[in-house]
Amino acid sequence: MCEGKARREVTAALLSDLVLITGISGSGKSIALHALEDAGYFCVDNLPPELLRSFLKIEQGHADAPRGRIAVAVDVRSAGSLPYLARLLEQLKGEGVHIRSIFLDASTDALVRRYSETRRPHPLTQRQPGTSLQRALIEAIDLERELLADLRDTSIVVDTSH
C-alpha cells in the first residue's frame, strides 16, 4: 500500500471533529478551551503543531474508548511552527479530517486592559530601555497580529473585546 493512501486511511479514521482554537494572547483561548471541555471535547492547550498528526494517531489508538471530539489550542508560543501548521491543516482536511478553526481576537485596548488586570506578561513582550510597559505590550500585540495573520484569514473570527 502506498504511503499516501495509508496516511489518508489512518487520518480519516482518526476522529469526527477537530476544533483548532487560536488567536491573540489574552483574547480568551483558555476560557474557550474550558468551555469545549465542558461540552465533552478532549482538550489540549499549546500543542506544538509538529505533534498534531502524531497526537491524532495516538488518539485513534484508544480502541476501547476513542475520543472523537478533540479541541487543540495553538498560539504564538509556537511561532516558529506556525507556517508548518497552515500546511498541515490543509493536508489533514484533504485526508478527510473535519477541522473547524476558530480565531479569537480582541481590540488592542481590551487586551491592554486585560494584561494590566492580570499582571501577566505577554509572551512576545521584550521591553527595550526607555520604553514604557504599555508601549512594549502594544508592540507585542501588533507583532502577534502579524505572525497569526494567515491563521486568522482561514478561520472563523470571534471578537471577544466585550
Image: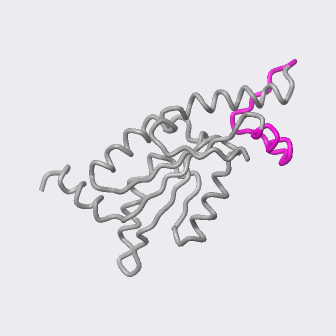
Give the left or right position of residue 82, taking residue 29 as reference. Answer: left
Which residue is at the far top?
Answer: 130
Residue at position x 75%, y 28% from top?
A: 138
Q: Is residue 119 above or below residue 132?
A: below
Q: Tell me the quarter of the picture where residue 125 sits.
A: top right
* Picture coordinates of residue 59, whole percent (x, y): 41, 67
| Residues shaded magenta | 110-130
Q: Residue at x 82, y 40 (%)?
A: 113
| Color style of the picture | one colour
Extreme-front residue of the structure:
162
Which residue occupies the extreme bottom position in the image? 64
As displayed, is residue 2 above or below residue 80? below
- The extreme left residue here reads 1
Residue under the point 66% across and 56% down: 30
Question: Horizontal placement of 52 versus 130: left or right?
Answer: left
How many dots with numbers? Answer: 0
Q: Position of residue 51 (x, y in %)?
A: 45, 51
**Which of the 4 image quarters holds residue 103?**
top right
Q: Position of residue 83 (x, y in %)?
A: 45, 34
As drawn, 153 above or below 127: below
Q: Residue at x 53, y 72 (%)?
A: 40
Quadrant of image for the N terminus: bottom left
Of 89 and 51, which appears nearest the observer?
Answer: 89
Residue 36: x, y in percent?
A: 57, 64
Is residue 122 located in the magenta-colored stretch of the structure? yes
Residue 109 on the magenta segment: no
